Image (tube, grey):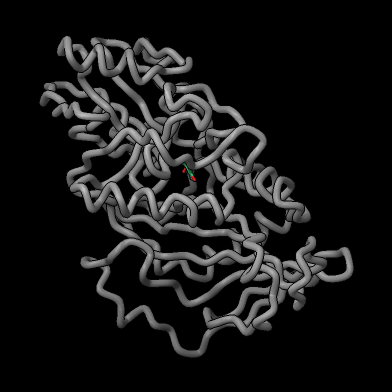
Amino acid sequence: MTLHIEKTTTSKISKVDFSNLSFGQEFTDHMFECDYIDGTWQTPKILPYAPLTLDPSAKVFHYGQAVFEGMKAYKSDDDEIWMFRPDQNQKRINISAERLGMPAFPKELFFDGLNNLLKLDNEWIKKGEGNSLYIRPFIIATESCVSASISDSYKFMIICSPVQSYYAGEVRVIIEDKYSRSANGGVGYAKAAGNYAGSFYPTKLAREKGFQQVIWTDSCSHEYLEEAGVMNVFFRVNNTLLTAPTSERILDGITRKSIVQLCEHEGINIEVRPVKVSEIMEAARKGELLEMFGAGTAAVISPILGFSHHDESFELPKVADSYATYIKKRITDIQQHKAEDIFGWTYKVN
Ligand SMILES: *Cc1c(COP(=O)(O)O)cnc(C)c1O
């Protein structure tokens, strides 16, 4: 299917201050879109970035049938555009879509749209430390009808936002023992919009108590640590890193699995197994809990400075040679094409 391209006549790029970006607020000049109607994906299009017109009864507004992805593109010093494991995002959006009863978006269309969009908005991808383009593919249910049933039409889109290195500020977390992000048999493993909607209220309560995020525990017993906000989570006890295995409740993060692979390759001791709240509390009391961090595309690694559970609060020590700093540098160097890509993770846009 040939991609239809309509270029903008008025670029916004001169109005953007690239040295002072807030995460996800500015968008590039173009967007990719493809509609699913009568059982087939229609002609894919790249259009000038603009608001959508949807019927107020479109099912996405009522039943939350929506999935998304988050990935990044970088510009190397010799002006090439590189992405980090986009094949993984392409697969995952279809895994998410299936769980929400949505049609898969074909791989060829995904990459054709992505490559062309990035080439067209090439000027928006800046070189240099910390600069990247955050890319947001998503699929929404567009059928105009409020009957509570599966939609018969969808829209797949990709929009892009220039970003600088993401700093979440000082992060202290509460280990959640009441609310859950996901449950067995639910949609936790899917990047479904509704998972985020459900996490905002518990996060708001945590903020009111002076914390920035929550650490989710399993919905049955609240005894096992699962994710940190919308990131996967790692704990360093002495010189061992711990992270939970993915499950139907835990999102299979691409940053997470890259960290696991990197550590295994570099001989950093890492255990992928269920992590108990009680063992982390015990390690913290003994001074053996050295680091905690979240892992996800936006920040790569986001260190956690302290945490609270029931009546106990801990500050993590300031360790020299932190694993978080080391791993983040190894991964971002590969992403930005400054270090050899021994794992075959990077993808050249062309
Ligand atoms: C997106 C997401 C992550 C991180 O996944 P990456 O592929 O590393 O960006 C982790 N947990 C949740 C719940 C997420 O939605």
Q: Residue at x 65, y 70 (%)?
A: 33
Q: Quadrant of residue 92?
A: top right
Image position, residue 86 (x, y; %): 56, 45
Position of residue 114 in the picture relative to residue 76 (left or right): right
Q: Quadrant of residue 294?
A: top left
* The C terminus, quarter of image: bottom right
| Residue situated furthest bottom in the rendering | 9
Q: Residue at x 12, y 23 (%)?
A: 317
Q: Residue at x 61, y 55 (%)?
A: 67
Q: Residue 217 or 251: which is nearer the viewer? A: 217
Note whether residue 290 is visible: yes
Q: Residue 340 or 169: which is nearer the viewer? A: 169
Position of residue 197 in the picture relative to residue 99 (left or right): left
* The N terminus, quarter of image: bottom right
Position of residue 148 in the picture relative to residue 24 (left or right): right
Q: Residue 154 or 350: which is nearer the viewer? A: 154
Q: Is residue 288 above or below residue 162?
A: above
Q: Is residue 42 above or below residue 86?
A: below
Image position, residue 125 (x, y; %): 39, 62
Q: Is residue 336 above or below residue 306?
A: below
Q: Residue at x 36, y 36 (%)?
A: 176
Note whether residue 1 is visible: no
Position of residue 260 in the picture relative to residue 287 (left or right): right
Q: Quadrant of residue 292?
A: top left
Image position, residue 255 (x, y; %): 44, 35
